Image (spheres, rainbow, N blue to C red):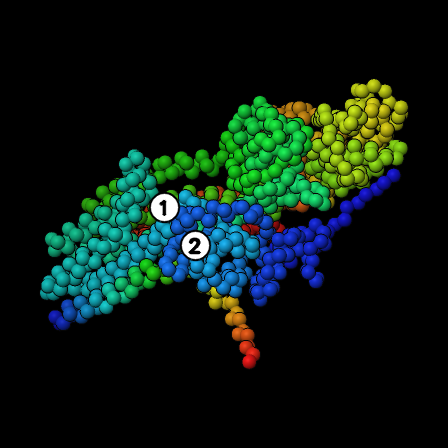
C-alpha cells in the first residue's frame, strides 16, 4: 500500500510575487519562479537599478520569454515611420502603450531606461494612460532593439499598427480650452455686472450701455465655443428623433442667450449673461470631474480584467500547470477530453475532434489531423492531444466567448427595466413641467418666468439613474474578482441576490481533487502496469482520474488507442494490445469475468476498480477530503437556504455528508448528468431559484439550467461557457459572504435610485417656485451625478470591507 | 468717473494676457498628465559615483 501526500510550497518569487514551483531558480537567498524573472533581477542588479525592488515589494511583471522572431516586423522602415512620433537627424521619439505599468516601481524603472542602454536619451511615463514616451538616438539603437529591451524587463509594449496614434491627446485638451475661456468670460462678466447688482441708476445710462455691450461681447465666445458640445450633441440626438439629456441644457442656454441679447440691444434690461456664462462654466467643470472619476474607476478594472484558466504545458521536467495568461508562442500544451483550446494552436500529436459550438454554434465535430490549425474556443472531444501555441491568448476573446448569445440566460432584471422606462419619459416630462411652470409665472413676472424656465431645464438630471447601475455592479464585480469569484457579467449579481436554494455537486466541488489519500487495494502493480494506467488516466479530466494519476509512479507515457470515457461509469483504453479499464465495478463487469470478489464495503471513500485485460486486479481507494471551511459554509448557508448535494458517486459517503447537510433527504447519490439536470428543473417547477455549484465536468447542463451556475475550479482548464461565474477553490469558504454581498449591492442600487429621485424632486420644487437661480441649478446638476457615483462606489467598498471581502 | 472705462479696458487686457498664458500652457501639454509628477517627485536622486584619479 502506497500513500502519497503533496507538499505545500510556500516560496514566493522575489521579482513578480507568484508562487515558485520549486527551488531551481535561486540567487543567494532569493528565489524566482522562472528563468525570466531571474534574468530581469540580474539585469537590474548589474546596472545598479536594484532600487526597483525597494519602491514596492514584488513589482515585477511575470515574464513571457519572447521568441526572437516576434519583432521581425519592426525591421520594416514603413512600420517604423508609422510608429514614430517624431524623427530628425539624431533623435527619434516614440510612445508606446504598456499595459503592465501598475506601480511606482514601473514608473521608476521605465524612466531610468537610459541606464540600461545609453543610446536611450530619456523616457517619460504617463501613469494613468499607461504609456511611455522614449527619446532615443536612432543611429545607435534601432526601434526594434528598444522594443526588445522593454520586453526583456517585462514591459512589452502593445503595438497596434492600425491605430491613429497622436490624435488621442488633442481631444482631452479641448475641454481645458473651453473651461479656460468660460472662466475668463464668466469672471469678467460678473465684475461688470456688479453695478447692476448694486443698483446703478438711470442717470448713468451711458455706463449701463457700455457694460451691457461688454457683457454681450464677452458672452459670445462662451456661447459659440465653450457651449458648443451641448448644441452638437442635442442636434445629433434630435436628428435621430431622440431627445437626449443635452436637449434641455442646450435649450436652456439658447433661451438665456436670445433673451439677454434682446434685452441689451433694446436697452430693456440687463440680460442674464452672468447666469449664462456661469451655467456653462459649472457644467464644463462638472464634465471634467465626471471624466476624471470615470477614468479613475475604469483604470483598475482594465488592468485586472481576466479570469483564471490554467492549462498543462509540456516542459523537459514534465507537465506543469500554468495560468493561461502566461502561454507563449511555441509552447506545447496538453488538452484533454472536454477541455477548451485557449489559444490558436497547431495539432502536434493525437487525434483532434473539435467541437466549435462555442464559437460558431455548429456542434458537429470537426476532425483535425497533424499540423492543422485549431482556433481558440474549440472543445476537444477525443482523447488528449498535444498542441503547439501559435498565437497568444486573448483574454478578451475568451470573455467574449463566455458572453456568447447562446449562453445568455433569460434574465428579467428588475432595475434595468425600471431605468429603461424612466429614461424614456424623463426628458419629455421635464420639458412639460418647464412649459407649464413658466407659462404660469408669465402672468406675474417675465423675469421670474424666465428664471423658472431655465432652472427647471438645467436642474433635472436623469444621469444618476443611468450611472448608478454600471458603477455599483462594476465595482462589485471588481470586489468579487479580488476575492477569486469571477463573474461572467454584471447581471449575475442581481440573479445571485434572488436565489433561495443551493445545490452542490460533490466530486471536485466539495471534495478537493488531487490531495486525497490514495491507496491501492490489490496485488502490487509493476512499473509497466503503473505506466500503462497512468497513460490511460492522463486523458481524463475527472477528479478521481487526476488523483490516480498523481498517485501512480512512472515517467513513460504510452499511446492509447480506443480511449473511451463514459460519464459516471469509467474509462477504458488500449495500450500495446492490453485493455485497461478503470471505473465502477459494474462498468468493469460489463466485460467478462472477474476473479476478484471484493465486496462493496461501506468505508468513507470512493473506489475506482481496475482491470487489465479483463481481469479485475483490485481498486484504488480514494478517500474524500472535503474542502476546508465546508462545515462552516454549510451551517451558515443552511440557516437561510435549502441545501442539496447531488453526486454521481455511491452511497458510501452518505453518513459523512450528513454531518454537514443535516437532513437526509437532500443528499442524492448515483446521479447521472441527466438526472442532475432534471433535479434542477423540478426545483424550478416548484418556483425555487437555484444556485448550483459544480466543477463543470458532468454537470454542465445543470449549471446552465440553474439561475446561477458557479464552476469551482482548481487549476484545471475545464471551462464551461454555460457557467455564470468561476470560483477559485481557495475562495470556497467565502460563499455565504458572496451571496450576502450581492444582496447588499442590489440594495445600494435601489438606494442610489432613491437619492437621485429625491434630488430631482427637491430641485424641481425649488425651481418651480422661482427660488432657484440658473447658476445654482448649474452647480447642482453635475453635483448630483457625481454624488450618486461616489455613493455607489464608496458604499460598495465600505460594505465589502465590513463583510471582509 | 469716466476714467472707469479706461480702467476696465486695461483690466480686460491684463486678464486676456493671463487667459492666453493658460491656453498656451494647455497646448504645450501641462495638463496632459496630472498624476505621474506626484509619484516622480518622491524618487531619490542617485548619489553620483566618485571618480578616481
Left or right of A298 on screen, residue A236: left
Residue at x 41%, y 57% (from the top left corner): A93
**At which x and y percent is residue A697?**
66, 32
Q: Residue A616 is drawn in which quadrant?
A: top right
Q: What residue is at 61 percent from the left and 28 percent from the top? A: A369
Q: Position of residue A46 (x, y in %)?
A: 60, 64
- Picture quarter containing residue A595? top right
For marks 2 and 1, the one nearer the N-term is 2
Q: Which chain carries label 1?
A: A
The correct choice, above or below, for A716 with respect to A169 in the image is above
Q: Quadrant of the N terminus of chain A?
A: top right
On screen, residue A228 above or below A211: above
State which mark lies toward you, 2 or 1. Answer: 2
Residue A7 visible in the displayed image: yes
Tell me: A322 left or right of A745: right
Secondary element at image label 1: loop
- Which residue is depicted at the point 66% across and 30% down? A350
Residue where numbered disc 1 is placed: A461
According to the image, label 2 marks what residue? A95
**Residue at point 27% right, 58% down?**
A181
User: In the visual, does A726 lie left or right of A229?
Assistant: right
Q: Can residue A694 be seen in this view?
A: no
Task: Using the image, name the chain to which the residue with label 2 belongs.
Answer: A
Looking at the picture, tell me which residue is in the foreground, A513 or A79: A79
Residue A434, quarter of the rendered image: top left
Instruction: Reply above or below: A249 against A135.
Output: above
Q: Where is residue A447 in the image (x, y as percent from the top left)?
A: 21, 51
Amino acid at each position: 500500500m502506497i500513500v502519497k501526500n503533496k507538499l505545500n510550497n510556500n516560496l514566493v518569487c522575489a521579482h513578480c510575487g507568484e508562487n515558485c514551483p520549486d527551488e531551481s531558480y535561486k540567487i543567494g537567498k532569493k528565489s524566482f519562479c522562472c528563468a525570466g524573472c531571474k534574468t530581469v533581477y540580474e539585469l537590474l542588479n548589474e546596472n545598479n537599478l536594484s532600487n526597483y525592488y525597494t519602491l514596492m515589494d514584488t513589482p515585477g511583471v511575470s515574464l513571457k520569454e519572447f521568441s526572437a522572431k516576434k519583432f521581425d516586423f519592426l525591421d520594416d522602415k514603413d512600420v517604423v515611420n508609422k510608429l514614430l512620433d517624431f524623427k530628425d537627424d539624431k533623435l527619434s521619439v516614440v510612445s508606446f502603450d504598456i499595459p503592465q505599468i501598475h506601480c511606482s516601481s514601473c514608473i521608476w524603472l521605465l524612466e531610468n531606461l537610459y541606464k540600461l542602454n545609453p543610446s536611450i536619451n530619456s523616457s517619460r511615463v504617463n501613469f494613468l494612460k499607461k504609456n511611455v514616451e522614449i527619446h532615443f538616438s536612432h543611429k545607435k539603437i534601432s526601434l526594434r532593439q528598444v522594443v526588445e529591451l522593454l520586453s526583456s524587463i517585462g514591459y512589452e509594449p502593445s503595438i497596434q499598427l492600425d491605430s491613429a496614434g497622436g490624435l488621442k491627446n488633442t481631444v482631452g485638451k479641448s475641454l481645458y480650452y473651453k473651461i479656460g475661456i468660460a472662466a475668463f468670460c464668466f469672471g469678467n462678466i460678473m465684475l461688470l455686472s456688479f453695478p447692476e447688482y448694486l443698483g446703478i441708476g438711470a442717470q448713468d445710462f451711458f455706463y449701463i450701455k457700455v457694460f451691457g455691450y461688454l457683457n454681450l461681447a464677452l458672452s459670445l465666445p462662451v456661447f459659440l465655443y465653450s457651449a458648443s458640445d451641448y448644441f452638437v450633441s442635442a442636434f445629433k440626438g434630435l436628428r435621430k428623433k431622440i431627445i437626449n439629456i443635452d436637449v434641455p441644457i442646450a435649450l436652456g442656454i439658447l433661451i438665456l442667450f436670445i433673451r439677454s441679447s434682446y434685452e441689451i440691444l433694446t436697452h430693456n434690461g440687463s440680460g442674464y449673461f452672468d447666469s449664462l456664462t456661469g451655467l456653462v462654466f459649472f457644467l464644463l467643470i462638472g464634465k471634467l470631474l465626471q471624466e476624471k472619476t470615470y477614468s479613475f474607476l475604469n483604470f483598475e478594472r482594465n488592468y485586472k480584467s481576466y479570469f483564471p484558466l490554467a492549462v498543462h504545458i509540456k516542459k523537459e521536467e514534465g507537465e506543469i500547470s500554468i495560468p493561461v495568461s502566461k502561454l507563449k508562442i511555441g509552447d506545447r500544451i496538453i488538452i484533454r477530453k472536454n477541455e477548451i483550446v485557449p489559444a490558436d494552436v497547431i495539432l502536434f500529436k493525437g487525434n483532434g475532434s473539435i467541437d466549435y459550438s462555442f464559437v460558431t454554434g455548429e456542434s458537429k465535430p470537426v476532425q483535425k489531423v497533424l499540423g492543422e490549425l485549431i482556433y481558440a474556443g474549440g472543445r476537444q472531444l477525443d482523447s488528449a492531444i498535444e498542441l503547439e501555441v501559435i498565437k497568444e491568448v486573448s483574454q478578451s476573446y475568451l470573455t467574449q466567448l463566455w458572453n456568447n448569445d447562446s449562453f445568455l440566460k433569460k434574465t428579467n432584471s428588475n432595475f434595468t427595466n425600471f431605468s429603461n422606462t424612466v429614461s424614456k419619459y424623463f426628458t419629455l416630462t421635464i420639458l412639460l413641467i418647464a412649459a407649464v411652470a413658466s407659462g404660469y409665472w408669465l402672468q406675474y413676472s417675465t423675469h421670474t418666468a424666465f428664471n423658472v424656465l431655465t432652472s427647471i431645464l438645467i436642474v433635472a438630471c436623469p444621469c444618476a439613474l443611468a450611472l448608478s447601475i454600471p458603477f455599483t455592479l462594476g465595482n462589485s464585480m471588481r470586489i468579487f474578482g479580488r476575492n477569486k469569484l469571477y463573474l461572467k457579467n454584471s447581471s449575475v449579481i442581481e440573479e445571485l441576490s434572488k436565489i433561495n436554494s443551493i445545490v452542490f455537486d460533490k466530486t471536485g466541488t466539495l471534495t478537493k481533487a488531487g490531495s486525497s489519500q490514495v491507496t491501492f487495494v490489490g496485488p502490487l502493480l509493476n512499473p509497466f502496469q503503473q505506466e500503462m494506467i497512468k497513460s490511460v488516466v492522463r486523458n481524463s479530466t475527472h477528479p478521481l482520474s487526476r488523483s490516480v494519476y498523481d498517485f501512480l509512479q512512472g515517467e513513460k507515457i504510452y499511446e492509447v488507442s480506443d480511449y473511451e470515457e463514459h460519464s459516471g461509469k469509467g474509462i477504458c483504453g488500449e495500450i500495446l494490445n492490453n485493455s485497461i479499464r478503470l471505473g465502477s465495478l459494474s462498468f468493469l463487469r460489463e466485460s467478462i469475468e472477474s476473479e476478484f470478489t471484493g465486496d462493496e464495503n461501506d468505508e468513507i471513500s470512493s473506489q475506482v476498480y481496475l482491470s487489465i485485460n479483463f481481469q479485475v486486479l483490485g481498486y484504488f481507494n480514494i478517500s474524500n477530503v472535503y474542502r476546508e471551511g465546508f462545515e462552516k459554509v454549510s451551517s451558515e448557508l443552511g440557516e437561510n437556504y435549502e441545501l442539496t448535494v447531488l453526486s454521481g458517486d455511491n452511497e458510501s459517503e452518505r453518513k459523512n455528508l450528513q454531518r454537514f447537510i443535516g437532513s437526509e433527504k437532500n443528499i442524492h447519490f448515483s446521479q447521472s448528468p441527466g438526472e442532475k439536470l432534471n433535479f434542477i428543473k423540478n426545483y424550478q417547477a416548484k418556483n425555487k431559484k437555484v444556485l448550483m455549484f459544480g466543477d463543470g465536468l458532468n454537470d454542465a447542463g445543470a449549471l446552465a439550467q440553474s439561475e446561477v451556475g458557479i464552476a469551482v475550479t482548481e487549476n484545471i482548464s475545464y471551462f464551461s461557457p454555460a457557467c455564470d461565474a468561476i470560483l477559485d477553490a481557495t475562495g470556497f469558504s467565502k460563499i455565504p459572504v458572496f451571496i450576502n454581498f450581492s444582496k447588499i449591492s442590489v440594495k445600494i442600487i435601489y438606494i442610489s435610485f432613491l437619492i437621485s429621485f429625491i434630488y430631482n424632486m427637491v430641485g424641481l420644487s425649488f425651481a418651480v417656485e422661482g427660488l432657484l437661480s440658473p447658476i445654482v441649478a448649474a452647480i447642482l446638476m453635475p453635483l448630483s451625478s457625481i454624488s450618486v457615483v461616489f455613493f455607489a462606489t464608496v458604499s460598495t467598498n465600505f460594505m465589502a470591507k465590513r463583510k471582509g471581502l | 468717473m469716466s476714467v472707469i472705462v479706461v480702467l476696465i479696458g486695461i483690466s480686460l487686457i491684463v486678464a486676456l494676457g493671463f487667459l492666453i498664458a493658460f491656453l498656451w500652457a494647455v497646448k504645450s501639454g501641462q495638463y496632459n498628465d496630472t498624476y505621474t509628477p506626484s509619484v516622480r517627485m518622491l524618487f531619490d536622486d542617485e548619489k553620483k559615483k566618485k571618480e578616481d584619479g
